[in-house]
Image: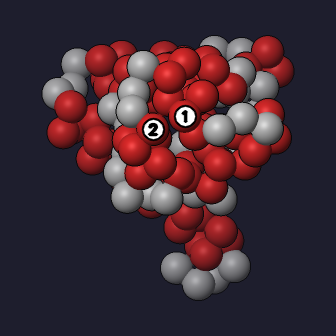
């Protein structure tokens, strides 16, 4: 499941509109809509706001398999290192990094089945 699908699923489970999510995290409905349909990737700060709003881990938000709820996961050294690296990147570098991580996650099942 990619990030857009995950965002949509989380929003629909709460039975709220795109407008409500966007207003809560401080972006336009149009920008949020682009995240759900995977036309754009949120910047680091917005990604954090979305994860906090939906009460999920960043790993889960970008398509990872970690436990859904933040309260069920603990900070790991890897997570802290990734966060630190992202904080030192400009907006374009963050977008590329998030896209790369998402691509790697999507490729993982293919590798396990011998398809990649």
Label 2 element class = helix
Where's the N terminus, which quadrant? bottom right
Label 1 element class = helix
Q: Position of residue 115 (x, y in %)?
A: 59, 84
Can you identify the residue that label 1 sits on? Answer: 19
**Sequence order check, earlier mark of 1 and 2:** 1
Q: Residues within 10 Å of mark 2 (few under 14, many from 20)?
A: some
- Number of on-image labels: 2
Q: Mark 1 touching mark 2, by CB under 8 A?
A: yes
Residue at the spot x=71%, y=21% of the render? 55
Disc 1/disc 2 C-alpha distance (Å): 5 Å
Residue at the spot x=33%, y=32% of the render? 43
Q: Which of 2 and 75 lies nearest the eye of the viewer?
A: 2
Whether 26 is drawn above or below 110: the answer is above
Q: Which of 102 and 44 lies nearest the eye of the viewer?
A: 44
- Residue 25 can be seen in this image: yes
Whether 14 is drawn above or below 36: the answer is above
Q: For residue 110, what is the image quadrant?
A: bottom right
Q: Position of residue 35 (x, y in %)?
A: 46, 48
Q: Position of residue 32 (x, y in %)?
A: 46, 41
Q: Disc number at residue 109?
A: none
Colour mapping: secondary structure
Can you identify the residue that label 2 sits on? Answer: 29
Q: Position of residue 46 (x, y in %)?
A: 42, 26
Q: Residues within 10 Å of mark 1 (few under 14, many from 20)?
A: some
């Amino acid at each position: 499941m990619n990030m857009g699908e995950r965002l949509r699923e989380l929003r629909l489970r709460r039975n709220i509109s795109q407008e409500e999510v966007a207003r809560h995290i401080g972006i336009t409905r149009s920008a949020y809509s682009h995240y759900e349909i995977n036309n754009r990737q949120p910047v680091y700060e917005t990604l954090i706001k979305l994860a906090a709003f939906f009460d999920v881990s960043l790993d889960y938000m970008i398509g990872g398999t970690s436990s859904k709820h933040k309260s069920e996961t603990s900070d790991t050294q890897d997570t802290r290192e990734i966060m630190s690296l992202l904080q030192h990147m400009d907006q374009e570098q963050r977008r590329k990094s998030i896209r790369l991580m998402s691509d790697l996650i999507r490729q993982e099942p293919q590798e396990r089945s011998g398809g990649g």
